[in-house]
Image (cartoon, helix red, strand yellow):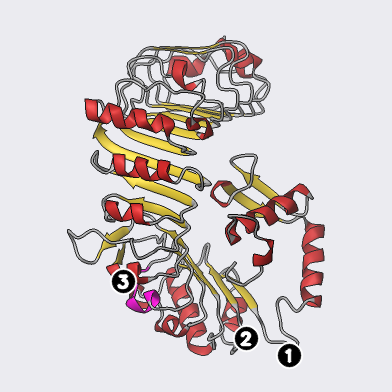
Amino acid sequence: MAEGLISSDDKGRKETLWDVAERYLNELASKCMVQVKSMTEKFTFENLKSCRLHDLVRDLCLTKGKEENFFEDPQGKIRRLAISFVDDDTACSVAQFKNANLRSLLLLNNQRTDLYVKKICQNLFTNALLRSLKVLVLENCEFEGRKLPDVVRKLVMLKHLSIRDSWVSELPEFVCKLPCLQSMDLRSRGRMALSNSTNKMGRLRHLFLDPVMITKIIDGIRLRLDGLTELETLIGFSSEIFDINNLLKITNLRSFSGYVYDIESLPVVVEYINKLKDQLREARLEIEVRDLSSEEGSLVIHSLTHCPLNSLRIDGRLSRLPTWDPDQLIQNLHTLSLFNSRILDDPMETLQHLPALRNLWLGRDAFAGTEMVCGSKGFPQLKSLTLWGLRNLKGWRVEEGAMPNLSDLEIFRCLKLEMIPQGIISMASITKLTIWEMPNNFLERLRREGEDYHKISHIPFINLEIPGY
């Protein structure tokens, strides 16, 4: 989008360029020109795990790219450059060039030392003329004093900036003044300070944050968002960092992920998601509140059953689950994680009716009871199930026909669980079983000569924490 490769003429009614780009990707994947791995059947940016080309398609693309002058202009000047810090000589020689026509620059560091990367970055930004740059990706890089190079202030054509996994201590004021900037990925590796200058970026459409790594330049004052009226993507909103009431003023949002750390902010966020339910393509919510079992907390949690969420993570005491009405929009939920919920009744009885659920994680004291049962028609779409730290769980029964699409099962530290369910034997779809930190008597039953080995012998990949297995 930043390079203008997505045609605005292809936009349908109420579509954005992002929608068009995803439609392009789906079309390429359906024609087997691009190999896409996704968490769901529909390929969206939020669900995308990886994207690659078959060797023959790659060769075709390289040939076509040369014909269309995609990488170089007719004078041989490079337009698009990606530097992967693998080979010393290649990276050093490339970093010495001067080029006024560069449109896209990607610095991708996977394994080099920080000192080496800092040297290459310093040479590149000192010697290269980047005034026409539209895309700048600085992945896993570190700069002198952990500050963005000052040359970035001159990139007046820049539309996309990413410092993902890089060491940057503070987002400088000059970045917020770049006139064409439309998307920023600020999910840095270390702590990074933001100021309210970000709120002045009225043209910004896509903002990616890591709330764990974001700090405020002025402590005690929440940052504002009400100036970002064109925002379509907001990933990493936090009730601790931003003014919660500003959220209601962002009306064009299509993708949202938020983190809520106080019971007072939760109704506001839920109201906001419900308000935009007809236009949101993706909504993810993580709630970390110690106790949600009060009357107030129970009411808010129950309101989530009508919320069009795709992913939900709750870390806090619930005691019981609300009633999930399959006729409500909660049917879009594909990922659910529960921690410290201390649910007394069997959660499977409720959760197995969620029609779109594909990933379920019951972690650290999510269930306080002793018995769980997965019914014969339960979890029709579930692909991944993790049971971790359910300290009281003794018995788990899986009826025949339950979880017909399960492919990945993980069991960690369920120290009282006596055996793996008999129903696992009929699950032809399961391809991976991982069991860690379980009691010896549980593990002994799963040895090749153990009495439960026949239950799992059909699984192609088995990872058991058994010495000598």
Task: Give the number of the mark in front: 3 or 2.
Answer: 3
Residue contact between numbered discs 1 and 3, judged by CB atoms under 8 Å: no
Task: Give the number of the mark in front: 1 or 3.
Answer: 3
Per the rendered image, the range of residues in magenta is: 168-176
Q: Gap between marks 2 and 1, in whole Å?
A: 10 Å
- According to the picture, the residue beneath numbered tag 1 turns out to be 75
The three-letter amino acid code for the residue at tag 1 is Gln
Q: Earlier in the sequence, mark 2 or mark 1?
A: 1
User: Tag 1, which secondary structure?
Assistant: loop
Q: Nearer the viewer, residue 427 or 177?
A: 177
- According to the picture, the residue beneath numbered tag 3 turns out to be 197
Q: Nearer the viewer, residue 244 or 221?
A: 244
445 with respect to 174 (left or right): right
Q: Gap between marks 1 and 3, in whole Å?
A: 40 Å
- List x then y, in percent, for residue 164: 46, 62
- List x then y, in percent, for residue 279: 51, 48
